[in-house]
Image (tube, grey):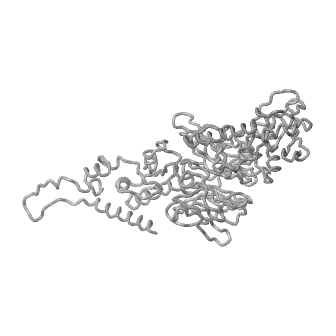
């Protein structure tokens, strides 16, 4: 129940943020006749509709430049919860798809090798579906299909934390 | 000499155990775990069978029988090199020769060549302590060279039944999935069926996409399994006689984890067409699909009770995967596992008194149905896909030793572990068959 609430919250937050993103606030001082030239005016606090500056995107989330260039979202062990980095990337893709309209998107869910194969198939599906819900809510207006490969298609077959981290993912494909 | 030999055997076993403890990867075929020191198998001598015309056999019957019986954990074969005599007939048996090497059971026999590729096997069993022959000996006839291994399994079954009183399972088979990298990152997946010990594997289905979760129909004639089409995983059934396959569940989302009901009339599986993976039941006769669970959590890996009045399944409804049971009669759900963070992929033993599962993501465990006490069968990290032998005395599972996958059979008490070295390569998803009917 709590998780459901959390999911709704995430989706709502996504909605609010995209709404902001579509109407960037012009920095104009209506009181003064002098044009205001400040440092802050040149820094976009909502770069790519993310709610972050470009430098924050890079330093906090390792997102360099447009989040659209990133197509893999990562997850915690046994979890389908979307972290902030994933939310930024998925939301940006949703916006982009919304502008393009009518594209077909495939979300490929994967799990690490721990746990059983059938459970991991379900977990990969759940991850892909969570991303699909977020993207739909964020205005993707596209046909989003989910497919899960569970633990069957790892990007790294090693039995290490780093490999597991890389394997717990959803790949956005279109 | 006698005492010295048994002491040496003990020493060897202890060293083996130590070797296992020090470095997990062990390539010994049989790992003796003598932690419960006084519990041990019945010492048995299986004399090399005399081949009457001296022709060379591909498989030594005594070796196959020894492998079978050792794997069960209920017997401890004595190496043939220690035998003082090699009788093949009743009148040649000297009790003292077998008491001297501490054998409690003796098996002897002969192989007769009756014509081109036509053999007959005869065997006798003895209780050394009572100085008694057990039964009147048996004759297995109409055998070709390739049947000789199966004749050996028949002998194992006879010995097992005679000295343990339980049902034997050495004529059963197993299914598994083998993966081959044909070219860089391009894999061929093959669903294989072999004798229980891995011999005589043959392909029953193949795909360029992953294959998993084979499950035997109760009559041993079909396998349900999970394959993929371009939309995702689907549940398929392949006939092991005709090799004809059909898709029984290819709905939206994940279709996975098929499980035949004990009477063969239904297949339970998991599907996520309504969003989250739920348990469904497919009626084999009417081809109707019925949704059974509708919880928000992941519900998967159904596995029927021996009489089919309930099934176990894995659910993440409380966060992490645990085992639950669904009662078909009153549609109630009860939680079965509480120990540890995770339990999954559960199944009952044939009499329903034990539940086998994967614990903490990669350790095989057995839970006592009455006390709920959990016993670890393995203490590895990447063990999976466990299944009971059809008599419940052994457990087949997949392990991995330094990135090398292997199929292993453990005695149900965990005391003896036998690696099935006849099956090699990238193997996974073993499933033990029901008994031949």
Where B341 falls versus B68 (above or below)? below
Residue B173: percent from the left, percent from the top? 73, 46
Residue B193: percent from the left, percent from the top? 70, 43
Residue A95: percent from the left, percent from the top? 35, 56
Q: Quadrant of residue B197?
A: top right
Outermost bottom residue: B330
Q: Is residue B24 left or right of residue B433?
A: left
At 64% from the left and 52% from the top, the residue drawn is: B247
Total numbered circles: 0
Where B3 falls versus A33 (above or below)? above
Where B338 falls versus B394 (above or below)? below
At 29% from the left and 56% from the top, the residue drawn is: A49
A78 or A45: nearer the viewer: A78
Residue B212: percent from the left, percent from the top? 60, 48
Q: Quadrant of residue B4?
A: top right
Where B89 falls versus B355 (above or below)? above
B258 or B104: nearer the viewer: B104
Q: Is residue A32 left or right of residue B36?
A: left
Asked whether the viewer can see residue A131, the reply is: yes
Q: Is residue B198 left or right of residue B337?
A: right
Asked whether the viewer can see residue B419, the reply is: no
At 40% from the left and 59% from the top, the residue drawn is: A134
């Amino acid at each position: 129940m709590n998780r459901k609430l959390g999911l709704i919250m995430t989706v709502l937050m996504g909605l609010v943020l995209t709404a902001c993103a579509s109407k960037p606030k012009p920095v104009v001082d209506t009181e003064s006749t002098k044009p205001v030239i400040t440092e802050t005016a040149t820094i976009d606090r909502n770069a790519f509709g993310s709610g972050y500056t470009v430098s924050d995107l890079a330093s906090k989330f390792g997102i360099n430049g447009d989040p659209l260039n990133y197509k893999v979202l990562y997850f915690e062990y046994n979890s389908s919860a979307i972290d902030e980095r994933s939310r930024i990337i998925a939301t940006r893709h949703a916006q982009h798809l919304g502008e393009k309209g009518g594209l077909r998107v495939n979300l490929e869910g994967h799990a690490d090798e721990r746990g059983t194969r059938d459970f991991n198939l379900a977990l990969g599906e759940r991850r892909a579906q969570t991303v699909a819900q977020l993207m739909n809510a964020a205005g993707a207006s596209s046909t989003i299909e989910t497919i899960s490969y569970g633990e069957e298609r790892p990007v790294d077959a090693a039995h290490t934390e780093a490999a597991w981290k890389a394997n717990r993912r959803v790949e956005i494909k279109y | 000499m006698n005492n010295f030999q048994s002491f040496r055997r003990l020493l060897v076993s202890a060293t083996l155990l130590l070797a296992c403890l020090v470095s997990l990867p062990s390539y010994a075929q049989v790992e003796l775990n003598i932690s419960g020191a006084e519990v041990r198998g019945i010492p048995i001598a299986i004399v090399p069978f005399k081949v009457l015309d001296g022709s060379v056999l591909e498989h030594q019957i005594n070796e196959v029988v020894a492998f079978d019986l050792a794997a069960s954990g209920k017997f401890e074969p004595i190496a043939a090199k220690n035998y003082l005599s090699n009788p093949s007939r009743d009148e040649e048996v000297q009790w003292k020769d077998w008491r001297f090497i501490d054998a409690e059971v003796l098996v002897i026999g002969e192989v007769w060549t009756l014509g081109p590729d036509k053999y007959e096997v005869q065997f006798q069993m003895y209780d050394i302590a009572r100085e008694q022959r057990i039964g009147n000996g048996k004759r297995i006839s109409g055998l070709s060279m390739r049947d000789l291994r199966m004749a050996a399994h028949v002998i194992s079954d006879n010995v097992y039944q005679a000295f343990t009183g339980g049902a034997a399972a050495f004529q059963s088979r197993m299914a598994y999935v083998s993966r081959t990298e044909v070219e860089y990152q391009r894999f061929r997946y093959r669903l294989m069926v072999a004798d229980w010990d891995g011999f005589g594997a043959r392909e029953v289905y193949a795909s360029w996409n992953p294959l998993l979760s084979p499950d035997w129909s109760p009559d041993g004639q079909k396998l349900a399994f999970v394959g993929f089409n371009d939309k995702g995983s689907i549940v398929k059934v392949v006939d092991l006689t005709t090799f004809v396959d059909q898709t029984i569940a290819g709905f939206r989302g994940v279709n996975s984890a098929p499980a035949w009901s004990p009477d063969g009339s239904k297949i339970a599986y998991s599907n996520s067409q309504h969003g989250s993976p739920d348990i469904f039941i497919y009626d084999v006769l009417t081809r109707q699909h019925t949704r059974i669970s509708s919880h928000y959590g992941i519900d998967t890996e159904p596995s029927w009770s021996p009489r089919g009045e309930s099934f176990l399944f894995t659910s993440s409804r409380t966060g992490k995967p645990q085992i639950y049971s669904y009662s078909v009669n009153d549609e109630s759900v009860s939680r079965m596992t509480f120990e540890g963070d995770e339990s999954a992929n559960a199944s009952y033993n044939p009499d329903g008194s034990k539940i086998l599962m994967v614990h903490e993501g990669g350790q095989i465990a057995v839970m006592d149905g009455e006390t709920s006490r959990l016993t670890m069968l393995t203490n590895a990290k990447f063990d999976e896909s466990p299944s009971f032998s059809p008599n419940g005395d052994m457990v087949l599972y997949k392990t991995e030793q330094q990135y090398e996958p292997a199929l292993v059979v453990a005695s149900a008490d965990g005391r003896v572990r036998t690696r099935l070295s006849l099956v090699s390569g990238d193997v996974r998803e073993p499933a033990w068959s029901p008994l031949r009917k």
